[in-house]
Image (cartoon, rainbow, N blue to C red):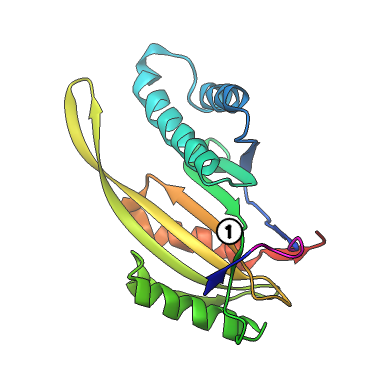
Amino acid sequence: MTTDAPTAAAPQLTFQLPGRWLAVDPRDEAVAAAQVDAAVRELVGTADDAATARRRLRDHLRRAVDAGRDAGAHAIFLCLEIVPDLATPASLTVHSPAGMRMTPAVGTSADAVLGVLRESFRVLGVEGIDTARRLDGPRASMLRIDRVREETVAEDGVEAVASRLEAEYWFAVPGSKHVALASFATPLGEIRHAMLSLFDSIALAASFGPE
């Protein structure tokens, strides 16, 4: 795996997102924060007894936006609900890692690109490499890596441990040695398998369109 300046823009990776999602431009911090706050009020309400729920959801969504901004993401989608009246805190961040490509000797097939990527991650000891799994959808192939992080959450002077699930889908860009990255995150790490099933279904339905 090497890095160099890209010679051409990659095709755009597009998703079919179930339920309701909020598209956020992370480049404008004030606008993004206002969008998140408005979405949280809509989902949770403004009652005093919902203050804790509002804070939890707002913190999760803002963290996703901030992480995407820091990583130079070109698209961030925040899940509001998968089914009506059931808030589902999750985020999708889409990147095209600048200049990241496989070594010149590697072909442009998905097998070649993802094979070298997986071996590179193994050599580098990337966190979650032991979970690596190859997935093939009808229009795109990818390598999935997931991890669960334990986080300490403090509320009203009481600390609790929460599980955060992160799932990375590294897509082989058709006809090139480049990859695109779709990162999902949710504070619902306790139901890892259910959330991975949801994320897998979204990733497997993804496709590459025109630039």
Tag 1 secondary structure: loop
- At horizontal 52% and vertical 37% (from top left) the residue drawn is 65
Does residue 72 appear left or right of residue 7 in this picture? left
Give the labeled residue for mark 1.
97
Q: Can residue 39 be seen in this view?
A: yes
**Residue type beneath disc 1:** Pro
Does residue 108 appear left or right of residue 91 in this picture? right
Q: Residues within 10 Å of mark 1 (few under 14, many from 20)?
A: some
Query: Where is the C terminus found, in terms of image quarters?
Result: bottom right
Going by the picture, which residue comes out furthest to the left? 158
Tag count? 1
Does residue 2 appear left or right of residue 28 in this picture? left
Magenta stretch mostly in which secondary structure?
Answer: loop
Residue 148 versus residue 25 in the image, above or below: below
Going by the picture, which residue comes out furthest to the right? 210
Q: Residue 30: which quarter of the image?
A: top right
Going by the picture, which residue comes out furthest to the front? 4
Residues in magenta, as a range: 5-10
Residue 196 x, y percent position in the rendering: 45, 61
Residue 109 x, y percent position in the rendering: 66, 84
Residue 22 x, y percent position in the rendering: 63, 37
Residue 171 versus residue 47 in the image, above or below: below
52 is within the stretch colored magenta: no
* Between 124 and 35, the one nearer to me in the picture: 124
